[in-house]
Image (cartoon, rainbow, N blue to C red):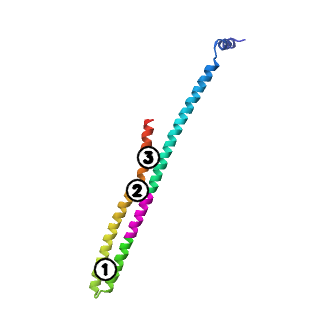
Amino acid sequence: MSKTTEKTNELIDNAAFDASKAIEQVSAFAEKGVEQSKEVLAKFKAGSETTQKALESSFQTAKTISNDLSLKTIAALRANADSAFSHFEALIAVKSPSELAELQTAFVRKQVESAVEQAKDFQAATTKAFEDVSKPMKTAFEKAMKEIKIA
């Protein structure tokens, strides 16, 4: 036999291999892995539930805001239609071309001012709507980021 083989055999003979200790170590390692997996799964489940609640809240808010914007649109259309009909009634009663020009100029000016005001209202409403719809998701994201920084 070679020197290397003799030394290897000698080391194996001298090494006291305790199978019960090895099994305990493997078992402890496996249990630790299972516990860590359970913790990760619990965090994932909590994060999923938080995200689901945030999405539900966002969708409910979007539905409510959509209804409000629809009502604003209908009100604006109604106001514009009423204004147009009133203008047509006034046009029927016109007696001179100068009165027609004056009436038409006033109507166009009023319509432009009304359109600008309606556009401002819609812009403000849609900006607020976007903020309200995104707020639950933003809050959930910020909470998740804090938890990640802590871990």
**Callout 2: SS:** helix
Residue type pointed to by label 1: Gln
Q: Read off the residue under disc 2.
A: 130
Task: Tell me where residue 137 appears, x and y as whole percent.
Answer: 44, 49
- Rounded to the nearest whole Å, what is the CA distance between mark 1 and mark 2? 38 Å
Of pointers 1 and 2, the one earlier in the residue sequence: 1
Residue 34 at x, y = what percent? 57, 33
Please rate how many residues cluster around mark 2, counting C-alpha atoms within 10 Å: few if below 14, some from 14 to 19, many from 20: some
Is residue 124 shown left or right of residue 24? Answer: left
Q: Is residue 81 magenta?
A: no
83 w.r.t. 66: above or below: below
**Which residue appears at 36% of the width and 61% of the height?**
123
**Nearest-to-viewer mark from 1 and 2:** 2
Locate residue 126, reporting x and y percent. Answer: 39, 60
* Residue hosting label 1: 104
**Which one is closest to the eye, mark 3 or mark 1?**
3
Q: Residue at x 42, y 60 (%)?
A: 64
- State which quadrant residue 1 falls in: top right
The mark closer to the camera, 2 or 3, is 3
Q: Is the residue marked by circle 3 packed among few (<14), some (14-19), or many (20+) residues within 10 Å?
A: some
- Seen from the viewer's position, the closer of residues 45 and 133 is 45
Q: Quadrant of residue 124?
A: bottom left
Question: What residue appears at the point 40 percent right and 63 percent down from the top-left corner?
Answer: 68
Residue segment shown in magenta = 62-75
Identify which amino acid the numbered label 3 is placed on.
Ala
Residue type, mark 2 in image: Phe
User: Would you name the residue on which mark 3 appears?
Assistant: 140
Element assignment for label 3 = helix
Marks 3,1: beta carbons within 8 A: no
Locate the C terminus and report the quarter of the image it occupies. top left
